[in-house]
Amino acid sequence: MQGDDSKEGKDSKRLSRAELLEMLIEQSKEVESLKKKVDELQKQLDDRTIQLQQTGSIAEAALALNDIFKAADQAASQYIESIKRMEHEKNVEFQVLRQKTLDACAVMREDTQEYCRRLRYESEAKRDALYAQLEKEKEEIEKNNSSEGSDPSTRTCLETSPSVGGGVS
């Protein structure tokens, strides 16, 4: 080792002071350059570490989102099933109410038809009774007129009416 030291020492002694300073500056620049390179590589390593962490975080987030989407899909399916069930129930209620309404309308129609038949019968009976009464009164008037003679002053308004008594004779 001493031989090596003495050889370096001899080489160093052979170099001038300016050359030594130049070598020292050059080595300082190289050290500075290497420090920058180490910093740059460290930054790249940190970036990759962050990227790997983010990738892990993104993967975890994707899994969490997948679970959220599954839950949302399940909730939507349950909601749709609930709506379909309610629609079916309302449709059944509607059909029951519709049938009740149709039945009630049929009963009202029958009642109305029966009421109209009864009114017609009663009206016809009243009409027939009035015609009979009028006919009877007419006969009585004619009978009274024939027994009293044909004096025009004794005629009643029924005899002179064109619709009831047949007009003036």
Image (cartoon, rainbow, N blue to C red):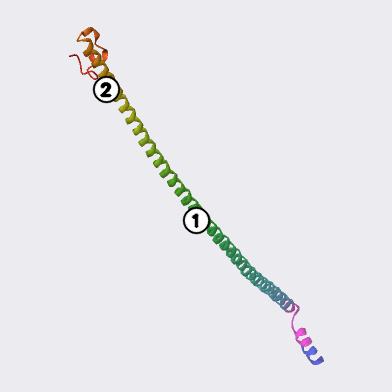
Q: Magenta stretch containing residue 17, yes or no?
A: yes
Q: Nearest the camera: 102 or 46?
A: 102
Nearer to us: label 2 or label 1: 2
Secondary structure mostly seen in magenta is: helix
Range covered by the magenta-colored residues: 8-20
Mark 2 highlights which residue?
135
Q: The N terminus appears in which quarter of the rendering?
A: bottom right
Q: Pointer 1: what residue?
A: 88
Circle 2 SS class = helix
**Residue 70 picture location, percent across and down:** 58, 65
As rendered, which of 78 and 91 lies closer to the eye? Answer: 91
Instruction: Give x and y (percent) for residue 62.
Output: 60, 67
Q: Quadrant of residue 168?
A: top left
Q: Position of residue 38 (x, y in %)?
A: 69, 74
Residue 83 at x, y percent in the picture: 53, 56
Mark 1 crowd level (few <14, some 14–19, many ≥20, 10 Å Cα):
few
Closest to the observer, 136 or 24: 136
Q: Residues within 10 Å of mark 2 (few under 14, many from 20)?
A: some
